[in-house]
Amino acid sequence: VNRLLGLVGVVLMVWAIVCTQSRGGLLGVLAVFGITGLRLVRSKVLLITVGAIAALVLFAAMGINKRASGGAHEEGIDESAMGRIYAWGAAWKMATSRPLNGVGLDNFVANYYFYSDHWDGSNHAVHSTWFNVLSETGFPGFLSFVWRVWTIAASSFRSMLRLAAARAPPVVQAMALSLVAGIASFCVSGTFLTQGFTWP
């Protein structure tokens, strides 16, 4: 029953992420499956092959290739990607102009106009956890954030290895593996999603 519920849950969550057509979501899903596969699949060649096929299937299912607007000025970079590049540039300017404290929590969007090189008539989100933290808290806040993520990741990884070595109950080992996979997914997908100060 647990395995059946787990399978249904995984299928529903992956389908929900597929429906968003989010590249960051796709990378997060691949990170979770990659970490899980590294731990459970002995043949790394098989893991890489299956991972590449899964990535292509998810990419096609999400319709990401249809998101490119095809404008001549974009040189193959779609509107969404260019928007991120402009937002990341604005974030960097916010951080360098206010290096000690940034522009303040939840103030990126309100300050976008003042720091962006490309104004299209509306403010935009930064679409990067790392640039979000950097722009809103400055360099000290960014270094503190990275240190905390690293500390949590290292602690979770050590715990996973210790529980496996001690032959802890399977449910406990599964939880430890899911924490490591979740943190990896946060780091990978967070590069394209603004998740620095959300409730998780």
Image (cartoon, rainbow, N blue to C red):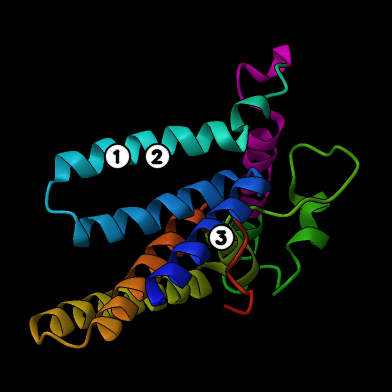
Q: Which residues are the magenta region?
A: 71-93
Residues marked 2 and 1 touching at CB (< 8 Å): yes
Residue for badge 1: 50
For marks 3 and 2, give the CA distance. 15 Å
Pointers 3 and 2 in contact (CB under 8 A)? no
Residue at image position (16%, 39%) is: 45
Q: Main secondary structure of the magenta part?
A: helix
Image quadrant of residue 143? bottom left
Q: Pick whichever, 154 or 90, lies toward us.
A: 154
In the rendered structure, which amino acid carries the disc numbered 1? Val
Any mark on residue 13, and which?
Answer: 3
The answer to whether mark 1 and mark 3 are in CB contact below 8 A is: no
Split into 4 quadrants, where in the image is the C terminus? bottom right
Residue at the image point whose x is 66% and y is 58% from the top: 94
- Report the amino acid beneath label 2: Ala
Give coordinates of residue 95: x percent, y percent: 60, 60
**The quarter of the displayed image where residue 196 is located:** bottom right
For marks 3 and 2, the one nearer the N-term is 3
Instruction: Please report whichever mark, 1 or 3, sits nearer to the chain's N-terminal start.
Output: 3
- Circle 3: residue type: Met
